[in-house]
Image: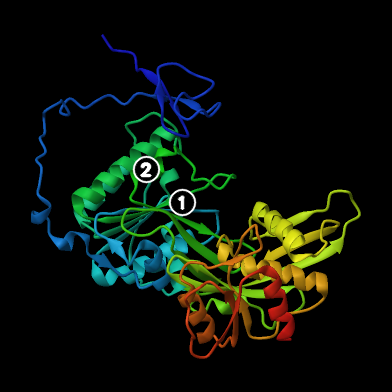
């Protein structure tokens, strides 16, 4: 007698399973995220105790197992933590048309020097892949495959035994043994589990492209990010050439690194001189330049401000590329400790180039830009401001100040307004203007006009 297929309900956010539908997930508290899926029957050979694992001493593990391979794209390697680790699984997410497939195809072309590479696409034909490869200068010997069935991909991996594999995208992969629709929670989870197993068993590094929802999160179950080793987000505006690659999870490196790219006709190009993107030129009224840290990299950023008399009882506070809450805090300190009346003015701030500024070392540059807009004065040319602003109006030191100042000197800046309490000595090629309080900073940039 045939048994009836059992179904269960799985949360799309956290993967919590239930035998009945629930409006609120008990695991994560999300509403209306329980989706009905068909239960996957356990294989007869997967009985408890059928295969045994044994513990291994770390001393017997070869150091070569964690050897990194360069992708040939410096910014990509930086975010990965120095290169690709054999047997790792990397998930790359981003908006449609942002350049995920182009970046991975260019990386695949470079990785061919270190072993066989298999590029699998479930969204494009081989002719479309060849057009992109020709435009980006990709090695024409790259192995490509247009397939969505996960079992056919397993068979091809067994035949070719590639060292690197790219899946574009995970939402198109399907397990024919399951009756769920393509792109469903069960299909995505099962396909990712198979690819992760292949990566570990075959010592093959797997790159997986993932779509994102309108909220900016990766489409599919939240547990998808827990199943892989590294999660990268490719950010940027499709109407702008700037692209940022961030790591939100990395088992083999830091998550503080950022990769900066530029979309061009010939493909994705890495940006080595970031000052060209985030600094427009001289210090105009309401503008200032600071140096923030993204991981181990110092980046110069220009901050702009604009103030206008408000026609309403509650003035507007708009921050592009900055935290609005932090801006309101700085405005309160600026009015109370700096003696500037801005409570009746609309305040607009912007970080040039579309970069996100979360470093508190940019506090001093932000308030100087706003003060310059209020007083109609500007910072002298070739001057940067670095420091954190406390609620008492004190300019506090920031992390890795020496590296920041050295980067400013390398790019030709002559003056740096820095915290007075720092132990920083003189740096060749740049004058240090040490200030202790906010009013001292006002005097410093007014006296050096």
Question: Residue 146 at what x, y percent from top left?
Answer: 38, 53
Image quadrant where residue 327 sits: bottom right
**Looking at the image, is 176 positioned above or below residue 216?**
above
User: Is disc 1 surrounded by few (<14), some (14 to 19) or many (20+) residues within 10 Å?
Assistant: some
In the picture as drawn, the residue positioned furthest to the bottom comes out as 429
**Looking at the image, is 81 positioned above or below residue 448?**
above
Please report the residue visible at 76 percent of the width from the left and 55 percent of the height from the top.
317
Decide if residue 205 is on the left or right side of residue 104.
Answer: left
Question: Residue 430 at what x, y percent from top left?
Answer: 55, 87
Q: Is residue 149 visible?
A: no
Question: Residue 400 at what x, y percent from top left?
Answer: 46, 71
Q: Which residue is mark 1?
A: 123
Q: Quadrant of the N terminus?
A: top left
Q: Quadrant of the C terminus?
A: bottom right
Tell me which numbered mark, 1 or 2, is placed earlier along the sequence. Answer: 1
Viewer-proximal residue, 186 or 173? 186
**How many badges with numbers are in the image?**
2
Q: Is residue 58 visible?
A: yes
Please report the residue visible at 61 percent of the width from the left and 71 percent of the height from the top.
436
Please report the residue visible at 65 percent of the width from the left and 69 percent of the height from the top.
437
Decide if residue 47 is on the left or right side of residue 331.
Answer: left
Viewer-proximal residue, 78 or 369? 369
- Mark 1 vs mark 2, foreground winner is 2
In the picture as drawn, the residue positioned furthest to the top comes out as 1
Please report the residue visible at 24 percent of the width from the left and 59 percent of the height from the top.
86
> Under tag 1, what secondary structure?
loop
> Under tag 2, what secondary structure?
helix
User: Is disc 2 surrounded by few (<14), some (14 to 19) or many (20+) residues within 10 Å?
Assistant: few
Q: Which residue is mark 2?
A: 226
Viewer-proximal residue, 98 or 128? 98
């Amino acid at each position: 007698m045939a048994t009836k297929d059992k179904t269960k309900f799985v949360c799309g956010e956290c993967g919590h399973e239930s035998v009945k539908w629930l409006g609120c997930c008990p695991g994560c508290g999300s509403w209306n995220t329980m989706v009905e899926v068909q239960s996957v029957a356990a294989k007869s050979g997967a009985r408890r105790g059928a295969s045994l694992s044994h513990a291994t001493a770390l001393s017997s593990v070869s150091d070569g197992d964690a050897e990194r391979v360069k992708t040939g794209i410096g910014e990509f390697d930086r975010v990965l933590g120095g290169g690709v680790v054999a047997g790792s699984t990397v998930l790359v997410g981003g908006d449609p048309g942002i350049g995920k497939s182009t970046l991975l195809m260019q990386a695949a072309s470079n990785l061919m020097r270190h072993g066989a590479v298999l590029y699998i696409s479930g969204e494009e034909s081989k002719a479309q892949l060849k057009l992109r490869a020709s435009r980006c200068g990709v090695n024409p010997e790259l192995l490509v495959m247009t397939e969505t069935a996960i079992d056919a991909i397993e068979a091809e991996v067994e035949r070719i035994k590639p060292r690197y594999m790219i899946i574009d995208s995970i939402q198109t992969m399907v397990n024919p043994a399951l009756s769920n629709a393509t792109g469903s929670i069960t299909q995505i989870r099962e396909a990712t589990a198979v690819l992760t197993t292949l990566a570990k068993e075959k010592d093959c590094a797997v790159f997986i492209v993932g779509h994102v929802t309108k909220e900016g999160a990766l489409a599919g179950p939240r547990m998808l990010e827990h199943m892989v080793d590294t999660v990268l987000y490719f950010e940027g505006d499709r109407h702008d050439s700037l692209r940022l690659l961030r790591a939100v999870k990395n088992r083999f490196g830091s998550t503080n690194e950022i990769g900066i790219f530029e979309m061009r006709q010939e493909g994705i190009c890495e940006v080595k001189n970031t000052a060209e993107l985030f600094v427009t030129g001289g210090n105009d009224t309401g503008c200032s330049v600071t140096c923030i840290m993204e991981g181990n990299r110092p980046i110069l950023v220009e901050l702009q401000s604009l103030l206008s008399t408000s026609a309403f009882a509650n003035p507007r506070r708009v921050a592009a590329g900055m935290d609005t809450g932090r801006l309101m805090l700085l405005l309160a300190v600026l009015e109370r400790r700096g003696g500037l009346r801005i409570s009746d003015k609309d305040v607009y701030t912007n970080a040039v180039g579309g970069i996100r500024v979360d470093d508190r070392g940019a506090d001093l540059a932000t308030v100087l830009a706003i003060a310059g807009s209020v007083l109609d004065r500007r910072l002298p040319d070739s001057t940067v401001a670095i420091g954190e602003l406390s609620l008492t109006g004190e300019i506090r030191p920031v992390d890795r100040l020496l590296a920041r100042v050295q980067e400013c000197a390398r790019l030709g800046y002559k003056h740096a307004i820095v915290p007075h309490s720092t132990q920083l000595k003189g740096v060749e090629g740049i004058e240090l203007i040490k200030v202790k309080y906010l009013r001292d900073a006002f005097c410093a940039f007014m006296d050096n006009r």
